[in-house]
Image (cartoon, rainbow, N blue to C red):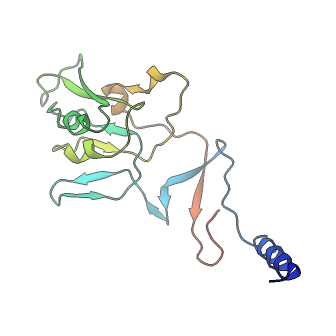
C-alpha cells in the first residue's frame, strides 16, 4: 500500500465517525437510566426459587425485605467462600418470622456482586437493585446495616434514556 492510499484510508476512517451519534454522558451530572433499557423496565438481579433460575438484571446494591427474612443465614454461608462480606447481626426490633432478630449486614468494600447470596435466599427477601453508585471516601460507610438495606436507594441527578440504534450505533436521547 502506498503512502497516499494509507493516508486517505486513515482520513476516511476518521471522517466517517463524524456523522455517527455519540454515547457520551457527562457523569456525574448525567447518568444512564439503567432502570429503563430498550423501553423495558429493568430491575436488579433476582432468583426464582420455583424455576431454579436467576433472572437477568443489573447487579448492584442489595435490598433486604426484613418482614420476609427468617435469619436462616444461608446468604452469609453462600458468601463465605467468595467474598465473606455478609455478617449476621442482631437488630433491636422483634419480628414474628425471625425469632432471633438476626439479619444480614453487607460490607460493600469486600462484596464482588456475584449474586450467590440472592440465589441462596429461600424466602425471596434479598435482591440486587440496579443502583451502582456506592463510592465513598470512608471505608466504614460501605458497611450497610439491615435497616439501611431495607430502604430502597434514592436516585439523584438527571437520568438519560438508552437508545440502541443498529445503523449508527448507540446514542442517548
Residue that sits furthest to the top in the current view: 92
Residue 50's spot in the image, x, y percent? 15, 57
**Quadrant of the rendered image containing residue 173:** bottom right
Q: Nearer the viewer, residue 30 or 106?
A: 106
**Relative to 78, residue 88 above or below:** above
**Relative to 124, residue 13 above or below:** below
**Quadrant of the rendered image containing residue 109:** top left
Tally the marks.
Answer: 0
Q: Which residue occupies 27% across, 56% down? A: 54
Q: Which residue occupies 17% across, 22% down? A: 101
Along the horizontal axis of the image, is 141 left or right of 46?
A: right
Residue 143's spot in the image, x, y percent? 39, 25
**Quadrant of the rendered image containing residue 68:** top left
Quadrant of the rendering where the N terminus is positioned: bottom right
Q: Which residue occupies 63% across, 78% down? A: 167
**Relative to 168, residue 36 above or below:** above
Residue 58's spot in the image, x, y percent? 41, 52
Q: Nearer the viewer, residue 85 or 92?
A: 85
Residue 97's spot in the image, x, y percent? 12, 31
**Relative to 163, residue 104 above or below:** above
Along the horizontal axis of the image, is 41 left or right of 155?
A: left
Along the horizontal axis of the image, is 74 left or right of 147?
A: left
Q: Nearer the viewer, residue 98 or 7?
A: 7
Amino acid at each position: 500500500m502506498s503512502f497516499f492510499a494509507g493516508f486517505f484510508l486513515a482520513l476516511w476512517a476518521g471522517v466517517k465517525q463524524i456523522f455517527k451519534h455519540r454515547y457520551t454522558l457527562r457523569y456525574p451530572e448525567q447518568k444512564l437510566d439503567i432502570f429503563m433499557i430498550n423501553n423495558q423496565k429493568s430491575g436488579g438481579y433476582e432468583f426464582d426459587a420455583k424455576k431454579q433460575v436467576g433472572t437477568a438484571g443489573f447487579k448492584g446494591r442489595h435490598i433486604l425485605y426484613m418482614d420476609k427474612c427468617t435469619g436462616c443465614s444461608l446468604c452469609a454461608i453462600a458468601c463465605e467462600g467468595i467474598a465473606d462480606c455478609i455478617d449476621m447481626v442482631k437488630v433491636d426490633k422483634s419480628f414474628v418470622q425471625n425469632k432471633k432478630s438476626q439479619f444480614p449486614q453487607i460490607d460493600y468494600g469486600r462484596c464482588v456482586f456475584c449474586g450467590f447470596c440472592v440465589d441462596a435466599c429461600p424466602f425471596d427477601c434479598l435482591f440486587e437493585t440496579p443502583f451502582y453508585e456506592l463510592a465513598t471516601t470512608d471505608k466504614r460507610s460501605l458497611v450497610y446495616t439491615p435497616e439501611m438495606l431495607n430502604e430502597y436507594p434514592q436516585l439523584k441527578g438527571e437520568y438519560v434514556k438508552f437508545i440502541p440504534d443498529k445503523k449508527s450505533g448507540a446514542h442517548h436521547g
